[in-house]
Amino acid sequence: MQRLALTMAALLVSSAAVAQPLTITVENLSGTDGFFLTPVWYGFHNGSFDLFSPGSPASPGLEALAEDGIVSVLQGEFAAPGRLQGVIANPAGFPGAPIIDAGETATTQVTPINPAGYRYFSYASMVIPSNDAFIGNGNPTAYEIFNAAGEFNGTRVIEIFGSNIWDSGTEVNDTFGAAFSTVGGTATDEGGVVALHTGLANFEGTGTPAGFNVAVGAAPGAGDLIARITISQVPEPASLGLIGTIVMAAAGARRRS
């Protein structure tokens, strides 16, 4: 029995030591012919990375993401030892751009090798078409995924509403020169600060490179659910119960023998 107890303890320690993969799922819940989301940047960190502060100018990385959906500059700003980041794209997006269309879902898996250092989750994505609208969390500790001991806190669901759309303050919201739009014209630098967006109604009826127009009435209101991000563990922690079942079965077999 002593050997059995030691075996069970070893199995439990081994299971706890092995980092379990996470699945991150992004759903674009905009209505038909609504607004798209560019591939979603995400990062796990210890709470020290602040994507933006309302009332302050956007960083170059956030500006590039909010105006053009480009994540490479933001990735450079985030990169540091002890952090983990990636991009969630949608291969089914319109040709040449793996964006997440209205009504579509994109997903990825990641294995956090240092859960204790990856406690918090940040994300960002451009809302398109727009001049510089985006979604993302300005509070770096808003979403705690692992506790201080590196234990998964359980499935986390982040719901994003129209009231959660931000304006990077880097480009005037006049539709001209907007990425992923066929309006054309030249964008105008704004030199402002990050603030909640005042609305995207001026893009209703405008064309997109996908070949259709944004529907009239598609601009989300403050209470409209526009996106959902779900972070779950794979396999589920019930695997620990399976280990216990195996050990119990082994003990029963030993008694019978």
Image (tube, helix red, strand yellow):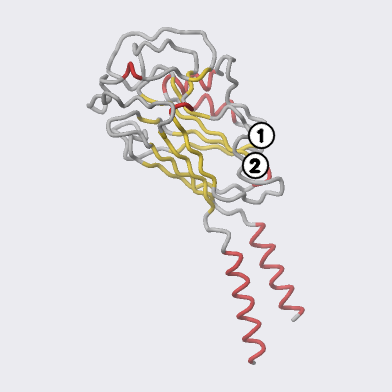
> Residue 106: percent from the left, percent from the top?
40, 42
Residue kind at label 1, given as amino acid type: Gly
* Quadrant of the rendered image containing residue 245: bottom right
State how far apart marks 1 and 2 are (Cα). 7 Å
Residue for point 66% across, 36% down: 81
- Badge 2 element: loop
What residue is drawn where x is 42% and y is 10%?
172
Q: Which residue is mark 1?
A: 47
Q: Is residue 110 left or right of residue 257?
A: left
Q: Pointer 1 and pointer 2: residues touching (CB < 8 Å)?
A: yes
Q: Residues within 10 Å of mark 1 (few under 14, many from 20)?
A: some
Q: Position of residue 3 (x, y in %)?
A: 74, 78
Image height of 187 relative to 42, above or below: above
Q: Residue furthest bottom?
A: 257
Q: Which residue is mark 2?
A: 119
Q: Is residue 237 above or below residue 113?
A: below
Q: Nearer the viewer, residue 94 or 192?
A: 192
- Which residue sits at x=25%, y=20%? 205
Q: Does 202 sit left or right of 169 as displayed?
A: left
Q: Which numbered disc, 1 or 2, marks the residue that appears first in the sequence?
A: 1
Tell me, for residue 215, which label it has, or none: none
| Number of marks drawn | 2
What kind of element bears circle 1? loop
Q: Tell me the quarter of the image containing the C terminus.
A: bottom right
Crowd around label 2: few <14 · some 14–19 · many ≥20 (10 Å): many
- Residue 198 or residue 3, whichever sits in front: 198
Residue furthest out toward the front: 223
**Which residue type does callout 2 highlight?**
Arg
